[in-house]
Image (tube, rainbow, N blue to C red):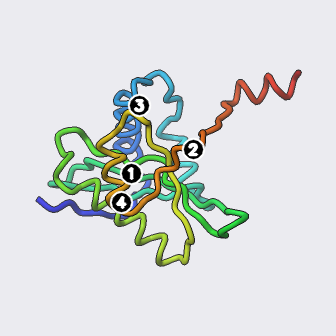
Amino acid sequence: MKPLIRLAVKDDAPAILGLIQGLADFEKAPEQVVITEEDLVRDGFGPNPRFWCFVAEVAHEIVGMALFYSRYSTWKGPTIHLEDLMVQEEFRGQGVGTALYRAVLTFARERNVRRVNWEVLDWNTPAIDFYEKSGADVLRNWHVVSMDDQAIESYLES
């Protein structure tokens, strides 16, 4: 069955959070999710959204999502960061992820975005293979750098 891809609405927040938790479980970091449905509603569906999200529906059930936001590159100009693309395990391999991926890239093209960036774990070889086959460049010589709120506080207080 072909999925229906659409922009998320605030009533989708519980399903989106469930998919986020599912991704955290898949990445072996379930305790890392601290975001709430209220955070998603406030940050994605208020007067100044901080992100967009496409959802994939099959038989009126949300089975996947792609959450992304605007960035700006000093070299390229407008860019999009694809934060997460997640499909429920039982729907993988059925074109749902591909449909979400295409929706994000179409969104970027329609807005004259010059680059879309995202990260992928080095052990997620099916995703890496898919991205490379699509024409994406997996930058193996770059390292992702991250500081959580506790590290920021610690650094600023030192």
Q: Nearer the viewer, residue 71 or 138?
A: 138
Where disc 2 sits, the SS reads loop
Residue indicated by mark 4: 101
Residue at 45% across, 52% down: 67
Camera-nearest label, 3 or 2: 2
Which of disc 3 and disc 4 is earlier in sequence?
3
* Of callouts 3 and 1, the N-terminal one: 1
Is 34 drawn above or below residue 17 in the view shown? above
Q: Can see residue 155?
A: yes
Amino acid tagged 2? Asn
Q: Is residue 122 left or right of residue 80?
A: left
Disc with the residue nearer the chain's start (4 vs 2): 4
Image quadrant holding the N terminus, namely bottom left
Q: Which residue is mark 3?
A: 24
How far apart are the two marked residues, 1 and 2, measured between alpha carbons? Answer: 40 Å
Q: Nearer the viewer, mark 4 or mark 2?
A: 2
Q: What amino acid is labelled 3 in the image?
A: Ala
SS class, disc 1: helix
Q: In the drawing, what numbered circle is on residue 149?
A: none
Residue identified by numbered label 1 = 11
Q: Does 63 appear above or below 4?
A: above
Label whose residue precedes the other's in the sequence (3 or 2): 3
Indicate which label's residue lies in the foreground, 1 or 2: 2
Where residue 158 appears, as percent x and y from the top left, is 88, 21
Q: Is residue 6 above or below residue 36?
A: below
- Rounded to the nearest whole Å, what is the CA distance between mark 4 and mark 1? 22 Å
> Is residue 45 in view?
no
- Which amino acid type is marked by label 1? Asp
Under mark 4, the amino acid is Tyr
Residue position for label 2: 141
Query: Which is more N-terminal, label 1 or label 4?
Result: 1
Residue found farthest to the left: 1
